[in-house]
Image (tube, grey):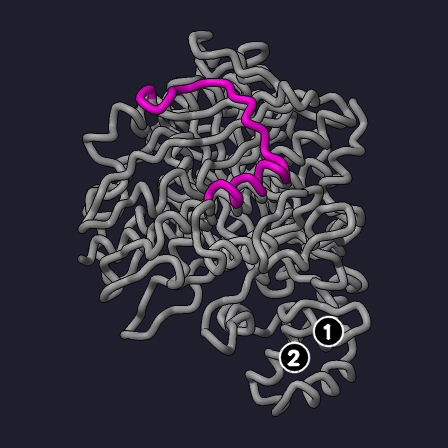
Amino acid sequence: MRRLRILVLLLFILAAAGGVGLIWQGRTVGQAERVRSAPIADVSSERLTTGGSVVGVAVSEESHAWFGIPYAEPPVGVKRWRAPTRPVPSTDTLDALQRRPGCIESNSRDTVDGEQSLIRGSEDCLYLNVWAPRFEPETVPKGADRLPVMVWVHGGQGALGFGGPLYDASLLASRHRLIVISVDYRLGPLGAFAHPSLLNEVGGSQSEFEPSGHFGLLDLIAALQWVRENVEVFGGDPESVTLAGASSGGSQVLSLMVAPPAQGLFQRAIVQSGSARTRSLAQAVHYRDAAEAGEVTSAREIVLRLLMADGTAPDRDRARYFADGLSPEATADYLRNQSPEDLFRAYLDPSGGQLLDFSGAFRDGVLVPDGGIGEALADLAPGESIPLLVGSNRDEAKLGLMQDPAQVRRTLDVFLRVRRPDQYEVLSAIQTALGRMEDVEGVADRIAARNGAPVYVYRFDWDEEPFYLGADLELLLGAAHGVELPFVFGQFQFDQETAARLLFNEENAPGRRFVSDSMMSYWAEFAYRGAPGRGRARALPLWEPWSLDPKEKWFMVFDTPESGGIRMSSDRTDERGIFALWSEGTAGWAVADRCEVFDKLLQSGPIGGLSEIDVPCVENLKTSDGGVKR
């Protein structure tokens, strides 16, 4: 029973596409730490970087790893909400033997003395990890022999995650001769905060891009600059860098594709289940009752919440009066004196105690263009565009649906049952298709239509999870958001005391290894040549680029041989297809049930250009041209 609770927890973390490693690393309070011998430095791994000498460890798969290399100074004290600065070089050798704590993140898992801890991690967190094939110092590749580099950006809804064991790149690095680097960067309100008192500070700015408010993005740019300056000493080519990320990490990659200071720092991009959607600067900054309304978690609203929480003001009106009377300097000092826990607590939903959403870039006009990421991608000149590999999972929406008590019944918070499997599948298909239409195919269309850069699209279909305690994990989870992550790194057995073993067992091992090996091969070939082709061994099906011809919108499907295998498909996603999912999927249902699903469809996104509507409750939603109003 405890294991299924862990599984439910794992699934939630997978939704964030970045926090899995926290459990799999054994950091959960109350869970026994695995007994490990202390890592031993491998003298043959010593390398000289711009920050000083570093020595790593020999890890599995004939590779070296260097953990916790600083790429910027700790962003603490007066450096909170500042652009990152170069680390001070050291004359001492850094023992880069163990991962550092991740950046401050929201936390729903740990308890201390019976109390749930709101946050975990450290503000001192701007570190990266490097994996490379094992080389003696004299055999590190040089010149034309230098290896391609893949820089990995973890996801986590913008508020959690770190470069943990889920992203163990030892197999990927050694098998396909790559340098792989994972990066930790500021999260939540420490990573993206747009209060004018911070953005308009006079003096002390380390970067002309600091007024963006996207400090996590600035961290990633600093990490890419570190890669450019240092990756050669590990055998990597600084002119052959692929930036890759999943979920909110994929969204960060899309943002960096159009961010001016990131141009030229990477030559290819991989986006797994990311999004180009953005918020306005007003939404991120203004009061919620301003003429241009801000969100409930806008920067100005957060200041009001802090003032009420510390007793400075008894209610919102008096907090606003007080805040509006503060000078920008006083406001900035006040914010920098807040503890990280108080900052995160200000984002709690008063009605439910859950943290409100941090995710979504805002259009600051500095790093993220005023017109949004999608428009900026379409406007890139041919010389600015780069090859892109982009995709999502067939059942993306299931991870959200399985947390909805209206969809999944929980008994004792252990036994999970889908209430209406037919409705569950229809809702998942519709919501997933709406997201794919905008975030995958929409992005591919924009790039291919305007600047001609090659785009390669995929869909991940693996869904062979087992039954557990009567729960059909294939139905509950399937090919949901985040499930593809272990496949990209080829890592499935992290810790026998964790929920990983509930998803990956001996029965599904052959199929998942087949899918994982193929994905790793294609990803590596893309890192080498900017095109996945037939994979590194030239033995896989040819991955054709995305086409603007509606009849030739080819994408690669990843599944087991028993379910169709690795294959190209042209099963296009569009509004009519989404409407057909509803119309056919609910055929024969009671009118009330059909209408309930249709209402959810309309809430998910705009549906236009549709004609045949045969349900009485939506007749009033028809437009004059036979379409459907949102």
Q: Quadrant of residue 610?
A: top right
Three-letter amino acid code of the residue under disc 1: Tyr
Residue 222: x and y in percent read: 63, 42
Q: Residue at x 68, y 59 (%)?
A: 620
Q: As displayed, is residue 501 above or below residue 148?
A: below
Q: Is residue 321 visible?
A: yes
Estimate how packed mark 2 is, as few (under 14), some (14 to 19) or many (20 or more) residues with alpha carbons within 10 Å: many
Instruction: Tell me what residue is drawn at x 28 percent, y 55 percent.
Output: 417
User: Percent from the top left, x then y, of residue 512?
Assistant: 31, 28
Q: Is residue 55 above or below residue 594?
A: above
Which residue carries the number 1 mark?
A: 287
Is residue 329 shown left or right of residue 398?
Answer: right
Question: In the drawing, does residue 379 fall left or right of residue 219?
Answer: right
**Tag 1 and tag 2, C-beta contact below 8 Å:** yes
At a point 62% along the width and 61% down the height, the residue shown is 80
Q: Quadrant of residue 463?
A: top left
Say whether residue 570 is magenta: yes
Separation of marks 1 and 2 at Cα, in angstroms: 9 Å
Residue 300, x across and y down, in percent: 70, 72
Q: Quadrant of the C terminus?
A: bottom right
Q: Which residue is mark 2?
A: 304
Taking the image as shown, residue 110 lies to the left or right of residue 235, namely left
Q: Is residue 536 above or below residue 443?
A: above
Span of residues in magenta: 561-585
| Amino acid tagged 2 | Leu
- Examine the rendering and report whether any part of residue 134 can be seen: no
Q: Nearer the viewer, residue 572 or 599?
A: 599
Q: Residue furthest top?
A: 538
